[in-house]
Image (cartoon, coloured by chain):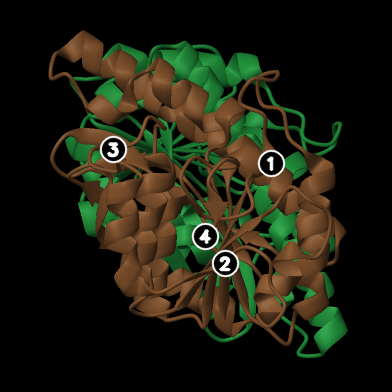
Chain colours: A brown, B green
């Protein structure tokens, strides 16, 4: 089994129109997956996308939880629901593209099966339906970064990266691949520092320090620092790849095959 | 807690355009619920709607399960996913109307939390998220009739009526209300026989016989016979009402209040 996360910046332009979706890029990604399916099992997770859920999540300050006063709570709950609906619209675009490539993709709604606590960490999950879908060769049961009911603060955001980390721990795929809008992990600023082609698990803490990943990143879901921290956990159970999802074609295929991949491989 | 099921024929015209949605009727229903919220807790379940999921479900013969041959299976899986996406579009319309009435509705995806067996009966369910949403006064965590992963035949349909029966058993609401496009249960053909205002649980088996409910109905989810059979189970745990959801206004409010309701009350 291979997990693939399609980052928000890969399929949507944060600075563009509301809910813009890069159909061409997603069609290419689906096409690369189709080359390997059904010999490989896949689960695809996609991010919030700057112009979809992220936008609503920021506007309604979902990450701050419920304020605890009736009218403000009600307004935030409505924002919570609007954020979810926006994510469902992003998800629907993915499903549409995957189905058009003859891939029997099926949507599983993140907020219906996960609960979070303490900054969007998963504290409860029911993946029974996901496992059944995989048994039936549904591919890929597409999940998405979403709002979440939070055990402590009522509402929060569950990022696609957290979902990747959780599923890696539970399902032990042979590979987890993050598609991003840069070529991989850089020792320095993305696109400026040196691209790291190979990274051993033991090297991650030092790298996090060099990247000044002390607090959460500026991204609503933590950005590259959070991704690296998650990858550090995930590398216990699976090889982790970071590759560019924007440049056509073959970076994803390379990571799936493994030998000739271009990006960052974390063992 | 009150469960309300909005039948497909209440919000959509089976004979009309694809995915037609009666916004005005749903707005009125949401308005009646808003009169009682937050003093009452609600869960709203809606049906497939003749012009939404039902259409795809019939076209792809989802109820027959997977045929067991690779290419036909793949085609049916794609139909299964298309059916779900159509139901999500119906659901999105409900959410939109409820939010516009200032009701913090939230969508829970049926197929993400239920598994079926033997003709769409629920054999597995995880309602943890639903219970948390209710605790937070999210109202109503709208669920919908949907496709389902079936333990025996791979795929099937889980009707809104089955969901009502299951939730009634688990959550023991004080009332479960079915909104339909007729005035209630008739002793004979709907609209022709006599409307039954009060029905005792013991009278249901005799009525089922008089209505010739021996086999499943013609409706993709069993129609009135199935509804009555489910109501018979539900009456163990809750009062059950059948009222007309099409006629403005007050039938739903009447059933919620109970004393002056117009429809069929099953004790």
The answer to whether B186 appears left or right of A89 in the picture is: left
Q: Position of residue A264 (x, y in %)?
A: 56, 64
Residue placed under numbered mark 1 in the picture: A11
SS at circle 1 = helix
The answer to whether dots 3 and 4 both sit on one chain is: no
Per the image, the residue denoted by label 3 is: A216
Chain letter belonging to callout 3: A
Q: Quadrant of the C terminus of chain A?
A: bottom left
Q: For mark 4, what is the residue? A: B111
Identified at 77% across, 61% down, the residue is A30
Nearest to the observer: residue A222 or residue A109:
A222
Q: Chain of mark 1?
A: A
Quadrant of the image occupied by residue B241: top left
Q: Where is residue B74 shown, x and y percent of the image?
A: 80, 76
Q: Chain of mark 2?
A: A
Instruction: Tell me the CA gap for discs 3 and 4.
Output: 34 Å
> Regarding mark 4 in the picture, which secondary structure is present there?
helix
Chain under numbered label 4: B
Q: Provide the residue designation for mark 2.
A: A197
């Amino acid at each position: 089994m291979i997990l693939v996360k399609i980052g928000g910046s890969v399929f949507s332009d944060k600075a563009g129109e509301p809910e813009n979706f890069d159909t061409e890029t997603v069609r290419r990604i689906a096409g690369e997956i189709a080359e390997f399916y059904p010999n490989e099992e896949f689960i695809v997770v996609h991010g919030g996308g700057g112009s979809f859920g992220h936008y609503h999540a920021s506007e309604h300050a979902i990450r701050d939880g419920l304020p605890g006063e009736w009218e403000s709570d009600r307004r935030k709950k409505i924002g919570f629901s609007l954020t979810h609906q926006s994510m469902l619209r992003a998800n629907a675009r993915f499903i549409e593209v995957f189905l058009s490539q003859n891939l029997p993709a099926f949507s599983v709604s993140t907020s219906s099966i996960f609960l979070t606590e303490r900054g969007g960490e998963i504290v409860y999950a029911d993946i029974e339906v996901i496992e059944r879908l995989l048994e039936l060769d549904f591919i890929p049961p597409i999940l998405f970064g979403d709002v979440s009911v939070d055990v402590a603060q009522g509402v929060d955001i569950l990022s696609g990266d957290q979902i990747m980390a959780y599923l890696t721990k539970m399902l032990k795929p042979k590979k987890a691949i993050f598609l991003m809008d840069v070529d991989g992990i850089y020792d320095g600023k993305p696109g400026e520092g040196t691209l790291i082609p190979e990274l051993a698990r033991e090297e991650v803490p030092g790298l996090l320090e060099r990247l000044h990943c002390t607090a959460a990143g500026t991204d609503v879901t933590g950005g590259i620092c959070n991704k690296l921290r998650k990858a550090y956990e995930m590398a216990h159970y699976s090889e982790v790849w970071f590759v560019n999802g924007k440049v056509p074609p073959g970076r994803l295929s390379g990571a799936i095959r493994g030998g000739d991949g271009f990006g960052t491989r974390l063992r």
